[in-house]
Structures are given as structure tokens and as C-alpha cells.
Amino acid sequence: MPKKIIVIGSGAAGMSAASSARKYDLEAKITVFTEDEYIAYSPCVIPWTIGGKVGWDNIIMHDPQYYKREKNIDVITKTLVTDVNDVDKTVTAGGKKYEYDSLVIATGGTIFIPPIDGRNLKNVFVVKTIKDGQSIQSALRESKTIVIIGAGIVGLETAAVLNEIGKKVVVVEMMDQIIPRIIDKDMADTVQKHLEEKGIKFIVRSPIQAINGNEKVESVTAANIDYPCDMVIFATGVCANLTIPKILKLDIGQLGAVEVSAAMQPYRDGKIVSDIFLAGDVVQCRSAVVSGPIMSQLGSTAVKQGMIAGSNAAGDKKIAGPVSSPWVGVIGDIHVAGTGLSLGLASWYGIKTLEGKATGFTRARYYPDRKPLTVKVSADVFSHKIVGAQIIAGEDATGRINWLASAIASGTIVEDFIYRSENAYCPPTSMVRDVVLMAVDDLRNKL
């Protein structure tokens, strides 16, 4: 009989898992369950879709009919999985039981909303799904001032987009800097200044205390000060969705996500649970920098993990490597990117670092429309291994941060990076000696 594979979740990890399982096993019966109405879209693009730069229909790559027609995968939408039993190997969804031989859990994460007064008022939103984005876009017609809670990448991208369409935007952040944890304060301050010059107001070191209003939002309270507004958007980070893992009593790691093996299989009481695989925001990863775990809640990581989990659910023997987690955001007119560990995270893991930094341009100095470029690279003072990098650029941060991510993943030391690395040069695309090399050279001199 054909193997029965069930996937819970239709995000990047879930749909990658289903497609990968089909490539490995052409006969398997593959079923995907999702609470969402829409599938196969990127939540990362929602800020720009809210702002009208991209149409909602354009960001949906495929629908359930496509997966049935082209891949013979059944995708059941708007259906909640309420129970999983790994003894009789059944999933309960929409009040019905379905048998499985292999199960992939790709339930993603949930936006953390602090338990404060007023969070259920009208015009309080999160940025996670297409439905969320459409609701925000609709409410914007009657909203002039928006408060965004959380100054991470998604929050800042949303803030910049709303500012561009003429809204007054206030960003509230509980930490002492924007983009906390993943970039250093000096780099964060540069981004903040860029957005402040556009008119966006920042309130840092100020946990949100309350959302005020009768039926609809009228203001928020932070650091004992009320800020009038018409809308609140929570961009307070993602927590692993542990509903299904807790039903199965899977081992939860120290970072609050499911601990998995290199084959993307979970543990229960320290022992591998057979025929179950996980991928995406619900799991913690192996770090390419340190021996301990790390979170990598990125679409690119989810796709890679989903492909491995799905293939293994179909009978393959693939393993996932450690992650250096390269990320990039477009915030206003600048690209902000990072990989590996920030100084704060490095310190948390007990790594003593030194940093190199350089500034220059994205193109040759004499070439028109060149943009400023700042690169910062850090290394372990003892091993000289590169452990982190951050970039602020007017354009093309992606290629440069990918270059540094590969170096981190390979365990490259600073001296070898200088010895072996070269950059392609063309006046419209780079300086003759790229700023990345200049930053690493500065680091070598300090080491």
C-alpha cells in the first residue's frame, strides 16, 4: 500500500516538506492540513503588500488545486489539527481521524502579545498572515497614527512602509535599542537615525503597559506616558507554536522550541521519536558558530529544513547542517543584514570577540548613484574564527552577507579569509576592493 504522509502546516517548511516527500516517493498519499485560508505565500512580503507595492493575488504562488493537479498532494485549508496520537498513528483534524505512516509538524510560530489591558480592542493587529495584512490595509483608510510595538526587522519594515504612504508612525521597543539581539547598538543607532529623519518616532526602554480605548484603540501607555493612536500593530517576535509538540510530550529545548536531531526528528525523554519530523519556526537549530542551540526563524531556514524533513518522512536519510542564519531587511532606503552572532549573543554564549569595521560604497567612488556601505565583522579573540557580521547598505547587502555567512559556516578564521577571498569588480557593482574585505582587514589588524 502507498505510504501515508501527513504534514501539519502550509508555510515555507510545510509546503517544502510535502513537495520534497513527493519527489522522493511518487506513490505516497500526502496530505497537508492548515488553519490558513491561503497557502504557498511569503509572510515576509506582507509589509510591502499592505503599502500597495505588491498585490495580494501576486504573493500567492500556488493554490490547493495546483498541488493536487501538479503534485498529487491534498491540501486541506481552514482546518485545525486538534490531536495527534503517535501510538495508533492518527491525526485528528476537523473532527475526523486520519492515519499516517510518517508525520511532519511544521506549525511555525505565534506572535507574542503580552497580557496587557486592551489587546482585544478594535484595530489591534499582528503581521503574520494575508488575512492580517488585509485587515490592516482596510483599517488604514480611517487611521492616521499607528503605534508599532516591537522594533525588530518586520516592525521596522512595516513602520517604513506606513511612513511612506503618509501615516504618522510611532515605534515602541522595550529594549535599549532597535533590532535587539541580532545587531549591535552602533549599527542599530544608524538605522534608527535613518528612520527618524523620515519622521518616524522611537520610544525605547519602554515596555508596552496598556492599550487604551472603549471599543476601538485610542492610545497606548508605555513608560507611564500615553501616546494617542488609531491603530496598534504588534511586531513583538515569534514564539514556537508548541500546541502539537506538547500533546506529543516532545522534548522542548532551552530556547523554548522543539529539540530535533540532524535528521529533523524530535526526542521524548531523550529518545528519538520514530516516524515524526519537524521543521521551521517550531524547532531550535544547531549553530554553526557555537556548540549550543540557536533559533533561526527565517524563511530560508524553514525551506531547507522542510525539504529535509519531508524527504526523510518519505524514507530518505538526509541530515541538516548547522546554521549561520543570514538575514536581510529593506528598511526605508537602506538594506540591513546580518549573520552569525551579534556582540550581545556572542557574550551570552561566552565568546570574547573583537570587531572590525569599514565604510565605503556599493559601487566605484566615481560611478553615478553609488550608495554608502558599512560592514562590521566580529571574531573570537582566541580562535580568530569569524563569528558574526552586519551590513548597512544603500543597495546589495544580500550578496555580501551571503559571502560572510559562508565563511562562518565553514569555520573560516580571519587570516584565511584575507588570504583566500577575492571579490568580483565592476564599477557599477562594487569598489575594486570590496568593503567586506576592508572590514575583515581592520579586524585582522586588531587581532
Image: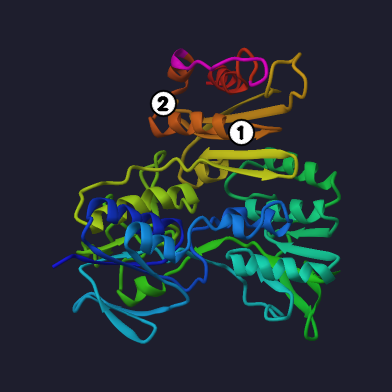
Asked whether 219 falls inside the magenta stretch, the response is no
Q: What number of labels is visible?
A: 2
Q: Is residue 301 left or right of residue 215?
A: left
**184 w.r.t. 311: above or below:** above
- Left or right of 286 in this view: 374: right
Horizontal and vertical percent for residue 243? 41, 74
Q: Residues within 10 Å of mark 2 (few under 14, many from 20)?
A: some
User: Can residue 275 be seen at all in this image of the molecule?
Assistant: yes
Specify the quadrant that holds the N terminus: bottom left
Residue 253 visible? The answer is no
Tag 1 residue = 397
Q: Position of residue 161 (x, y in %)?
A: 75, 53
What segment carries the magenta color?
419-429
The residue at 63%/60% (across/down) is 56
Q: Secondary structure at mark 1?
A: helix
The residue carrying mark 2 is 412
Hey, what amino acid is under mark 1?
Ala
- Pick the front one: 327 or 191: 327
Which numbered dot is residue 253?
none
Q: Position of residue 352 (x, y in %)?
A: 50, 35
Which x, y percent locates residue 171?
76, 58
- Check whether the beta carbons of the residues at disc 1 and disc 2 lie within 8 A of each other: no
Compared with 233, 391 (above or below) is: above
